[in-house]
Amino acid sequence: MIQTTIVTTIDSQAYAPKLAYRIAMSQPQTHLFEVKLIVSHWDGEHLDIKMPVWTPGSYLVREYAKQIQNLVAVSATGRKLGVHKVAKNHWQIQTNDSSKISISYQVFANELTVRTNHLDATHGYFNPAALCFYIPGFEHCPIELEIIPPQPDWQVTTPLPEIGHQTFLAADFDTLVDSPFEIGTQRIYDFTVLDIPHQLVVWGEGNLDPNSAIEDIKKIVEVEAKIFGGLPYKKYIFLLHLSPAGGGGLEHKNCCSLLYPRFNFQGAEKHNRFMQLVAHEFFHLWNVKRIRPAALEKFDYDRENYTPSLWFSEGTTSYYDLIIPRRAGVYDDREFLVELSKEITRFLTTPGRLVQPLSESSFDAWIKLYRPDANSSNSQMSYYLKGEMVTLLLDLLIRDRTQGAKSFDDVLVQMWEQFGKAEIGFSEIQLKQIIESIADYDLTEFYDRYIHGIEELPFNDYLAPFGIELQPVEASMPYLGINVKTEQGKEAIKSVAAHSPAQLAGIDPGDELLAIDGYKITADKLNERLKYYQPGQEISVSFFHADRLMSVPIVLATPQPQQYQLRSIEHTTEIQNRLFKHWVSI
């Protein structure tokens, strides 16, 4: 009979099994990590092992167990032990009274992201959540990891302490999950900030200038450390993968993994975007790695961990990844306002902001944000983006009410002192109370309208005391409401805006756009063609819908702003100038 629960007579605190991993990659070109978990001093009729279904910092069930193959368990004498699959990520081993069990398996690793595993002839990278099992009830046990590279010149980079030649120790499973590994011939650049050693570790080729990048990284580290009163680690690693395309980051307590397009470092705009990524992931070492919502105080790797407060964990961090580089001198006031204008434009051109409340967006991250579809922009709002906008308003509110004496920085410092240092999870109510105490203002109405509700954010009401206003850039064409992209020689309609003329006429995402008023149209010429028409004018749009040729009449609507700009108000006062300067520099 298959046991589906741990035997209740096992007391996980009465004894501690010894756990050791050996991770090899003898044929890296096959993308297979060869993993062996050795469990010693085991006392039980069976051994349950589970693979996490997600990793902290990326709120989606990713089903890491799907990449496991050829799992075999043997006793100390080499006798094969019975292994039964209990659930999608749960195996149970019949120990036959063996106190030492070796579990061998392979993990297919050919997905280069910051939250998965990648192995090829040039390097090996893995996130332990996507590679290593945990034993329920024994997550607190120390874990040794021996790395066996395929070549003698391959080195190992990880934030874990080395206790022997290419052998590392994690204090517990949470620490293991929080410690990615880079194995190969990566380039390592050492530097010091505030007397603490740091490393920039780079895999891949591109146009990165490491010396220039390190100079700005140092500035960002110093500015963020100033907010929180120092650095909470003894060493930190910036692990950078240069990829053909795509990007992203994943935070850890003592390092971060960064993925960035290999030729996107030259030029001010591209350099600034990379520094914003650095600022974001580094800021997380306080906000979310240590200052955590109560639902994330203790990770449950078996299922979703729901919280309405990701708007603070991620959105507030997104706000600071814009303003930190300004404070660090990476870019100036004008560039900061340009970057912030882009974010506000993204927000105000997302119809879903009027459908999904911010707190709901956070709670539903597991089923929505990381699983976008053609209707997502109409029905969803990113807690990153709206959280960034809400934090902007709260920062401006606090600065205005205190005449610059306080800011959202003070909220972060109090959250750090009260929750972060001791790593005690905070509740939604506690977060609200701390913001209110700093602002000396009841935020119940603000929360009801903008966090739990879907009212439009009144940007100009909050920007005016700083001598700044938000203005739409007048559109030069009437509104149709479709997003078209050329794919394999066809004009694919990728999305259709809610309540737009196109949607009301029955055009759907996935349709193929053919012509306007009988003339062929392509994605790159669509906006130019629409300029020939006036709002209220009827056009005929031809397209394929489910392989059926269709033509429908559509009445074009009033132009809709596609861009918003922040600019200085004419004749600003001395107080407005002082508040603005304080906002962008302190």
Image (cartoon, rainbow, N blue to C red):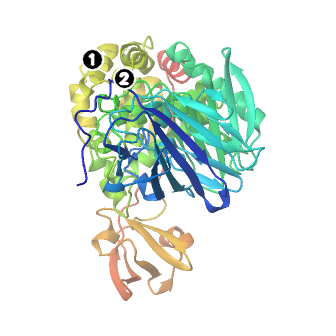
Q: Which residue is mark 1?
A: 441
Crowding around mark 1 (Cα neighbors within 10 Å: few <14, some 14 to 19, many 20+) is: few
For this rendering, which residue is in front, 269 or 227? 227
Q: Is residue 453 left or right of residue 177?
A: left
Which residue is at the front of the view, 375 or 503? 375
Disc on res. 122: none
139 left or right of 210 in image: left
Cα gap from disc 1 to disc 2, whole angstroms: 9 Å
Q: Residue extending furthest front?
A: 77
Image quarter in which the N terminus is found: bottom left
Q: Give residue 397's mark.
A: 2
Task: Please name the residue shown 26% across and 28% down the image.
Answer: 428
Q: Residues within 10 Å of mark 2 (few under 14, many from 20)?
A: many
Q: Earlier in the sequence, mark 1 or mark 2?
A: 2
Whether 407 is drawn above or below 363: the answer is above
**Identity, as a three-letter code, of the amino acid under mark 1:** Tyr
Q: Answer yes or no: do the residues labelled 1 and 2 have beta carbons within 8 Å?
A: yes
Amino acid type of the residue that numbered disc 2 sits on in the rendered structure: Leu
The structure residue drawn at horizontal position 33% and vertical position 56%, both measured from the top left corner, is: 84
Q: Is residue 243 visible?
A: yes
Could you say where residue 232 lies in the image, as x and y percent from the top left?
Answer: 53, 18
Across and down, in percent, residue 129 comes to 46, 43
Q: Quadrant of the C terminus?
A: top right
SS under mark 1: loop
Q: State the SS at label 2.
A: helix
